[in-house]
Image: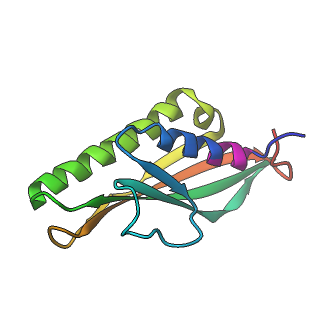
Amino acid sequence: MSTPIITLIKNRIEIVLNTITDIKKVYMCPTISSNLETAPFPFINAYYTFDGWEFRNQLEMNVINLHIETWVVVSENIDELVTKFELYEASIHKAIFDELETGILHRYTQKVEKKSPLYEYQDEGSVGRLTQEYLLTYGHTKGNSFL
């Protein structure tokens, strides 16, 4: 049996995020919040939402909202933390867009939009979170989500 295009895309995103060497663990669509006391920092929580679909002649266009949270320990001063956030943001961005150039995401996504990242932290000794969102538009034949 064929694999639905959405499954191919979601599986590939997980593989791509796991290739980032600085990240210790990737949690895809976790059903419960990560325990910040035992979590291996830095780690990623990635979620999907779907923004609906529209029909274009015989194509069905769908949008995946990919929400990526990168969690880090705030042990440096704030300037070093912002630099660390920027490095993680660049690593994630490069991994996704390298895949968009040549891989499965290149074959099936029509358009990718990146929203502005959000850096959140409190003070030294706590945790910080980098939030990134990508909108991936993909399409398939109307009524047939398989290859």
Mark yes or no: residue 67 visible: no
Q: Is residue 69 left or right of residue 118?
A: right
Residue 22 seen in render: yes
- Say left or right for 30 vs 41: right
Is residue 121 rendered magenta in the image?
Answer: no
Q: Which residues are magenta?
A: 5-10
Residue that sits furthest to the top in the current view: 102
For image coordinates 43% across by 70% down, the residue present is 35
Q: Nearer the viewer, residue 29 or 111?
A: 29
Where's the C terminus, which quadrant?
Answer: top right
Residue 86 at x, y percent in the picture: 24, 48
Closer to us: 104 or 141: 104
Instruction: Specify the farthest residue to the right.
Output: 1
Majority secondary structure in the magenta region: helix
Please tell me which residue lies in front, 35 or 118: 35
Q: Residue at x 59, y 37 (%)?
A: 105
Image point 12% across, 52% down: which residue?
A: 80
Task: Examine the image and state in which quarter residue 22 appears.
Answer: top left
Location of residue 95 in the rendering, given as x and y in whole percent from the top left corner: 43, 37
Frontmost residue, 35 versus 3: 35
Expressed as whole percent of the image width and height from the top left, the position of residue 70 reads: 37, 57
User: Quick check: is 7 in the magenta stretch?
Assistant: yes
